Image (tube, rainbow, N blue to C red):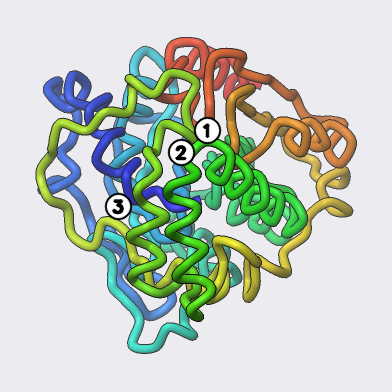
Amino acid sequence: MKNIIFLSIALLMTGTLMAQSFPDSYTDGKFFNVNGAKLYTVSVGSGNPLIIIPGGPGGTHLPYRSFDSLSVKSNIRIIYYDAFGRGKSDTANSLQEYSLARDIEDIEGLRIAMKLDKISLLGHSYGSLVCQGYAVKYGAHLSHLIIANGFHSFIMWQENDDNSNKEIKTNYPEVWDTLMKVREQGSISSDAIHQEIYGRVPYGFLYAYNPDKFVSRGQRAYPNPFNTKLYYQMVGKDGDFIVGNDIGNFDFRKQLKDLKMPVLIIAGRYDHVAVPWMQVKFKEYCPQAQFVMFEKSGHNPQVEEPQKEFALIKQFMQY
């Protein structure tokens, strides 16, 4: 679930939008004090507030700037933010301060700090955990909920690990063999050498329908673009194989059916991490939701089928 490469490649998709009159992520943001930390935000447009919750855990808001177009000719205000420990926001003194519960509470704290009544949430990938947790606890303040390429339980995240590793073993045997050698010597996911070997697999292989859309050509540096230490604190020290800690314990399956706000669930047919056979189970756990499978997308329909996704979200937000 690491979005390290996604940070640089997804920025390719935002260049045209950023060249327009949208605020600049590097210079036009605003800090809010939330639960003892300063969180960095960037707002685009006006109208009903829709907070975009990034993936990772550990990623920033920057790869999601293609969502700017949702604010055009609509009554939607897009609010981007760097969560605690990411990007331009404050970092923790201790890794134990990073948790799913903290990320959920920070959304409520941000709502209060920004003096917003009701908000809508779009949580992508790991961000879907945060938005589901918020919906369960603070549903009275939630207008619309969008779960984008998300996970309903630790069972599904473990399937992400298992499927990813199966695909790598089958299609990148030379990488897999090298990885197995260092694992046999005691290395685990959070070790630098393990991360380096794992990172030899192209992002587009596991995450894309069309890998050509995820070719990096270089972008401006952004502060703390992916907090690896935070990632392994939350997924567990060997989290690319066995999920643990917060990600090894979350489970919203029993609670989703009780949500009262409109819910939209977005999935990708070629998503090899938030796998389709687990995605469709959202229909059972949250039967009241609108479920849409994007047939020519992997983990990021906002990059591979943006016009279709953004039109869908604009329509959904009118409910």
Q: Which residue is mark 3?
A: 41
| Vertical arrangement, residue 35 with respect to residue 299, above or below | below
- Give the residue type at disc 3: Thr
Q: Which residue is mark 1?
A: 299
The front one of 204 and 297 is: 204
Please identify, in this view, whether the residue under mark 2 or under mark 1 is nearer the observer: 1
Using a 10 Å C-alpha cutoff, classify the residue at mark 3 as few (fewer than 14 neighbours), some (14 to 19) or many (20 or more).
Answer: many
As measured in the structure, the alpha-carbon distance from the residue carrying label 3 to the one carrying label 1 is 24 Å
Q: Which residue is mark 2?
A: 49
Dot 2 falls on a residue whose secondary structure is strand
Point 75% across, 55% down: residue: 153
Which quadrant holds the C terminus?
top right
x and y, in percent, of residue 35 in the image: 43, 76
Point 42% across, 83% down: residue: 95
Dot 3 falls on a residue whose secondary structure is strand
x and y, in percent, of residue 252 in the image: 78, 55
